[in-house]
Image (cartoon, rainbow, N blue to C red):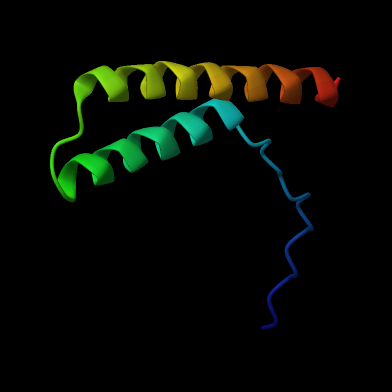
Amino acid sequence: MPREPRPERPRRVHRTDWMSLLCGLLFIGMGIRYLTGPDPDAVVMAPILVGGLGFAAFVAILAKVIRR
């Protein structure tokens, strides 16, 4: 007995969440930096963290504006 073909289901495409992606990459990069080599100075890493989070937010806002 042959099987009936399944009806075609439209493919769902999810939009990229740029804020999450960039923040995740930032934290992975900082974690790798702490695991390899000598410990970096916290006075240097704190502004890099804040600047990276600000950049991720800026990109996320731009992506939201462009999508509309």
Picture coordinates of residue 60, whole percent (x, y): 64, 22
Q: Quadrant of the C terminus?
A: top right
Question: Which residue is at a point 51% across and 36% down the rendered structure image?
Answer: 21
Left or right: where 33 falls relative to 49:
left
Q: Nearer the viewer, residue 40 or 32?
A: 40
Picture coordinates of residue 61, whole percent (x, y): 69, 16
| Above or below, 57 relative to 33 | above
Question: Which residue is at a point 26% across and 46% down the rendered structure image?
Answer: 32
Left or right: where 10 falls relative to 22:
right
Q: Nearer the viewer, residue 17 or 59?
A: 59
Q: Quadrant of the N terminus?
A: bottom right
Picture coordinates of residue 48, whole percent (x, y): 39, 24
| Above or below, 14 relative to 19 | below
Residue placed furthest toward the left: 38
* Count of residue discs: 0
Question: Which residue is at a point 75% across and 69% down the rendered structure image?
Answer: 5
Left or right: where 56 falls relative to 24:
right
| Above or below, 5 relative to 11 | below
Left or right: where 20 falls relative to 38:
right
Picture coordinates of residue 54, whole percent (x, y): 52, 16
Question: Which residue is at a point 71% across and 43% down the rendered structure image?
Answer: 13
